[in-house]
Image: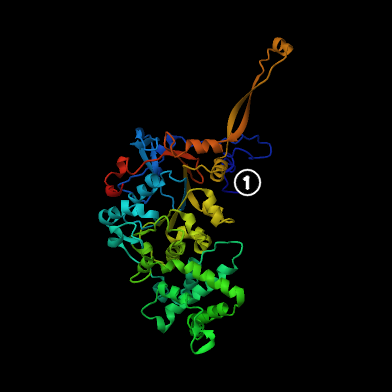
Amino acid sequence: MDEGQNADGLFDILNDLPRGQHAEFVGRPPNAHFESPENLLATESLRFDSMQNHASKIFLGTLGGNLVTGPRLADGRISRWVEGGVPLGVGDDRHQITFAGTRAGKGRSALVTNMVTLPAQTSVFCIDPKGDLCKLTARYRAEVLGQRTVVLDPFECTGDLAKKYGASFCVIKKLVTSDRKTFVPNAKLIGDSLIVNDNPYDQHWTDTAKQIVAGLAAHVATHVNYEGKRDLVTLWQLANELTTPDPDDSSRYWLETEMLASDAADGMVRASARQFYDRTGGEFSSVLSNTRKHLDWISIGCVHDVLRGDSIDFRDLKRDSVCVYLTLPAMRKDALRGWLRLVVQFALAAFEEESVSNGPQTVMLLDEFHVLGKLSVLESAIAQLAGLGLKLWIVLQDLSQLKKSYEKNFETFIANAGLLQVFGCADNTTLEYISKRLGQSVTLTRSTNSPTFEQATKQAASGESWSLASHPLLDVEELSRYFARDDKKLRQLILRPGYRPAILQRAFYDKHELFAGRFDETFS
């Protein structure tokens, strides 16, 4: 043995493995189990102080709380909530994914509770369908915590809050201030954001549309004719002028002439125009119609207000303390996916662009994540974002929504998550995946048969036998029942890499004393 080696500790790296320590070792069968509540309560790193959350932990739930049964709801269900108990949270610097079925109470037990317990020094960016999070928490974060609060709400879903904290994001102004290294990539990011790939099996039409939109963005940002109106509204107007004839040259369109004469962006404007106008016949018409279709949402008058004027700088999320609410009506979010994608992708890109970091990681809460579709920035940088000061919290109803957008790479998101939170799910895809993740547990199985007379009299055979076998820790049916929306014990499942699965209670912002006085009761 070499000098410095510890003979007793040499194989310590193997001795806690259940199987395969060496060729002759007879191992134990798989035996997964849940972490005991006692161990969870004794783990100091899980303790959560809702008033002094200096570590910017994510609140998860409670243990040991009292279950209270209230009156029946209008639909006949019994209302239940938790009071007291020990609050628990996680300070993991990796991303987080929540799977919660429709109407399962994710806002009530997870989103609102964290919007009022994340400290003032933690910047927050959240997609807020319908504006409920903003209405319940914006005043607390702005007036009590003193955090700069910004609301991007073209339809004024949040009422007076949209007027008080309203802002715009003028992406062309961002392009104007880009340097030579980032100008063309940012123009291409505008194209990628605005043109949604509805058919992943035929990307030709969307890729070509992205090229001309990127060229139009660069043209609006650089050409003297658009001074004073460098915004997406102008880009949309130009998209509708792509086939207007040139009065001075009947063989060309006027915008074609203007773009081909441009040397801006090291020739990128000219190249994008040539790629577009060199197409003929049905291909030209298809690309044109596809481009206009994806930009049509800009025609909505109230949307112009958030595309023009003084613009928020998303680098402030990293170098300052800011809370941003991105809100759309529930019925409009699909139609305005381009707007959502644009804001989110440029917010993500800001964390790579900005080198100065002030305070803890920014939390980016992406509710209804699937509505965004496939985001090129996110797919390529998911593993690096945590290191750049950004923690993603992806909220979905089921695993299928993630698979739809990221068919081949959906597990990359899960692999980069430090926590999976599951409750209220009822679909097989999610439940089968979670059941497999929980592993196998040893069970004692009883079997019976009818012994013969001779076996019974001479061998005292009872016909009963017992055997050990491995079964899923929880199967699909059990997962759907024990973590249901209306589970009597309000349970949720927490999965963390490197730790045994845990079960916690869900605590509601409007019922638990931890959150009293920290949300706007006017909207509760």
Q: Is residue 89 above or below residue 355?
A: above
Q: Is residue 322 above or below residue 9?
A: below
* Residue 464 in the figure: left or right of residue 172: right
Q: What colour scheme has been applied to the protein in the rendered image?
A: rainbow
Residue 451 x, y percent position in the rendering: 70, 16
* Residue 376 in the figure: left or right of residue 21: left
In the foreground, 175 or 418:
175
Residue 382 x, y percent position in the rendering: 50, 59
Q: Is residue 291 visible?
A: yes
Residue 317 x, y percent position in the rendering: 37, 62
The number of discs equals 1
Q: Residue furthest top?
A: 457
Q: Is residue 54 visible?
A: no
In the foreground, 489 or 315:
489
Q: Is residue 435 above or below residue 338?
A: above
Amino acid type, label 1 = Met
User: Which class describes the residues within 10 Å of circle 1: few (<14), some (14-19), or many (20+)?
Assistant: few
* Residue 161 in the figure: left or right of residue 462: left
Residue 320 x, y percent position in the rendering: 34, 63
Mark 1 lies on residue = 1
Badge 1 element: loop
Q: Is residue 212 above or below residue 332?
A: below
